[in-house]
Amino acid sequence: MNFKELEQRATNIRINIIKALHSAGSGHPGGSLSAADILSVLFFHEMKLDPENPKMDDRDIFILSKGHAAPVLYSALAEKGFFPEEDLLTLRKINSNMQGHPDMRKVRGVEMSTGSLGQGFSASGGAAMARKMDKKDSRVYVLLGDGELQEGLVWEAAMSAGHYKLDNLVAFVDWNGLQIDGNNDDVMTVKPIDQKFASFGWNVLMIDGHSLPEIIDALDQARACKGKPTLIIARTIKGKGVSFMEGSAGWHGKAPNEEEAKRAVEELGGVWA
Amino acid sequence: MTVKMATRQAYGEVLVELGHEIENLVVMDADLSKSTMTAEFGKVFPERFINMGIAEQNLYGAATGMAISGKVVCASTFAMFATGRAFEIVRNSIGYTRANVKICATHAGITVGEDGASHQTFEDMALMRTIPGMTVVNPCDCVSAKKLIRQAVAMDGPVYVRLGRAPVPNFYQEDDDIQLGKGKCIREGKDLTVIATGIMVSEAMIAAEKLQEEGLDVRVVDINTIKPIDRDIIVKAAKETGRIVTAEEHSIIGGLGSAVAEVVVRECPVVMEMVGQLDTFGESGKPDQLKEKYGMDAEAVIRACRKIMER
C-alpha cells in the first residue's frame, strides 16, 4: 500500500477544492474537505474504474448523495484524469459543466445527478439491486452527509438495502457533526447512527475518516461481509486540512476570498498562482 | 355489447408480454401489485420484479438507480403517491437525469370511487407536465393502453402513464393505428370539437351522438398524450370548428384543458369550455355517481357543448 501517494492525492484534491470554490465565489468547502480522504481511497485504491473508458461495463460506481460537496467529487475525478484540472475553475459559472451540484449528463465520471438530499442514496440501492440481478461483481459506493440522515427517504432506502441484503453496497456517512444551522445534535440529532443502521440490517463500522489505513481496512471488511450492506461511519472534521475552516459551521456554504484561498492552499503545501 | 375492462388490467397483461420480449425490463411496485396489476409480471418473472414496500419515494429513487444501470423500468403505485408524494424524486432523480423510467400509475381520478378524496388525484397530469422532458400519456381504453405502453417502453426517457381503476368500454379495434403523441379524430363534426382524454373519450362520444339529435355536429378528438401535445390536431379543430370543449378526469387547472388552451391562445384563439374536476376534492361513492356529481360524464360534456354554442 502506498499511503504516501494516497495522502498526496487527498492533498491535491483539497487544494483543487479551494481553488475551485474561490473561483466560483460560492459553494461548500467544509463538507468537501471533510470527505477528501475517503474519495482519495475510493478513487485511487478501492474502485475499479477507467477514466479512458468511463462507461466500462463492470466498473464500480460512486454516487455523491451529499451533492453539495460537488467540489470534492469534481476534484477527485480531475485528479483521476476524467477531465482537465482547468475545468474545475469553471465551477458554478454560466455555461459550465461544473454545476453547483453534480450533473451526470454534463460531467464525465459522474454516475448520478444529486443535490436533493437522500436521492443519491436511494439510487445507489437501485444500482446495487441491478448489479445483483445481473450477477455482476461490480460494487456501488455512496457518500452521505450526517445532516442528510434527517431525510425520511434515507430510511426508506436503508430499509430496502437491508431487506434485499445488498452486500455490494457500501455507504459512508461523512460524520463531521455540523450542518447549516449548527451542530447536528442541536438541530436534529441523528444519533445513534450505528444502532439505527444495524437495526435496519446493515453491517456497521466506525472509523476515523481521515485515517487512510482505517478507510482501507473498513472497505476490506465491507467486501468480506456477505448478506448485508455496509455502512462506514467516518468521523471527520468539517473543513479538514485548512486550519481556519476546521470545525466551523460557518464554512459549510461560503467560498474563501483571495486572501483566504491563498492561505488555505499554502497551508496544504500547494502553490497559489 | 362493448367489452369493459380497466386500463390497469391492460397494463398488467402487456407487461407480461413485454417481459418475454425485453430482457432488461424490470418492474417495481410499492405494495400495490395486486391493484396496479404488476403482480402477474412478478409471478412470471420473479427475478425481475421488486417490491419496494410502502415507500414511494424510494420506489422512484431506486428505479432511477436501476435505470442508470441499464435497465428499462416500469415503476408502479397509485397515481396520487407516484406524482404527489414522490414528486420531487420524480423531478430531480428521474426527470433531471432523463432516466429510462416509466411511471405507470393506476387509480387516477374520480373513478377510484369508494376510497374517497385522499386517493383521488386530479393533479397528477398537471404535476408531471411541468417536468422538462417528461412525456405524459393518458389512454382512453385497453386497446390503446396496450399500444401506448409498448411505445412508452420502447422510447428512451421518462414517461408518465396514467391508468384507471374502473372498467372502461373498449373503444378501439386491435388494428387501429394508435401513436403516442398523436391525437386521433374519432368523430368528424363541423360545429364544435370536444377534445377529450382518458375515460372522457367515451363520454364525449356518447355526448356527441346525443347532440346530433339536437342538430349539433360535434367533432371528437382523443388526445392520448398530454405532453408533447399534438398541436396540429388542436389548431385544425380550432380553425375548422371555431369552438373547443376539453374533457378530462382531472382538475381543469393544469391538465388537458390548460394544455389545449396553451396551444389555442397562441396559435388560433377560439372560445373554449373545460369539463373536468373543478377546484375541489372528491369523496367516496360509486364511480358513476361521482362522475355525475362532479361533472365528468357525458351529461357534463353536453352541458358544456350547449353553453359554448351560446357564446
Image: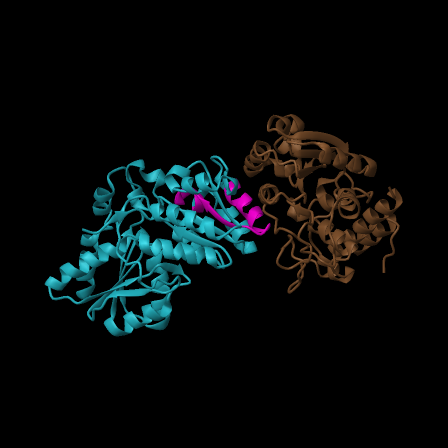
Chain colours: A brown, B cyan
Residue sitting nearer the eye, B309 or B63: B63
Relative horizontal placement of residue A69, taking residue A44 as reference (left or right): left
Q: How many labels, in total? A: 0
Q: Is residue A30 above or below residue A155?
A: below
In the foreground, A156 or B101: B101
Residue B68 is a magenta residue: yes
Considering depth in this image, is B170 or A179 the residue closer to the camera? B170
Residue B44: % across, % down: 45, 41
Determine whether, in the image, residue A143 is placed left or right of residue B221.
right
**Relative to B230, is A200 above or below?**
above
Where is residue A260 shown, x and y percent of the image? Answer: 80, 51
Q: Residue furthest bottom?
A: B239
Does A230 sit left or right of B20 as displayed?
Answer: right
Q: Quadrant of residue A204?
A: top right
Depth check, front residue: B262 or B144:
B144
In the displayed structure, would residue A48 be above or below residue A179? below
Quadrant in which residue A103 is drawn: bottom right
Answer left or right for B225 relative to A209.
left
What span is colored magenta in the figure?
B58-83
Residue B196 appearing in the image: yes
At x 60% / y 50%, what residue is drawn? B69
Residue B130 in sight in this render: no
Residue A11 at x, y percent in the picture: 83, 48
Quarter occupied by the C terminus of chain B = bottom left
Give coordinates of residue B273: x percent, y percent.
Answer: 26, 60
Is residue A219 one of those drawn in magenta? Answer: no
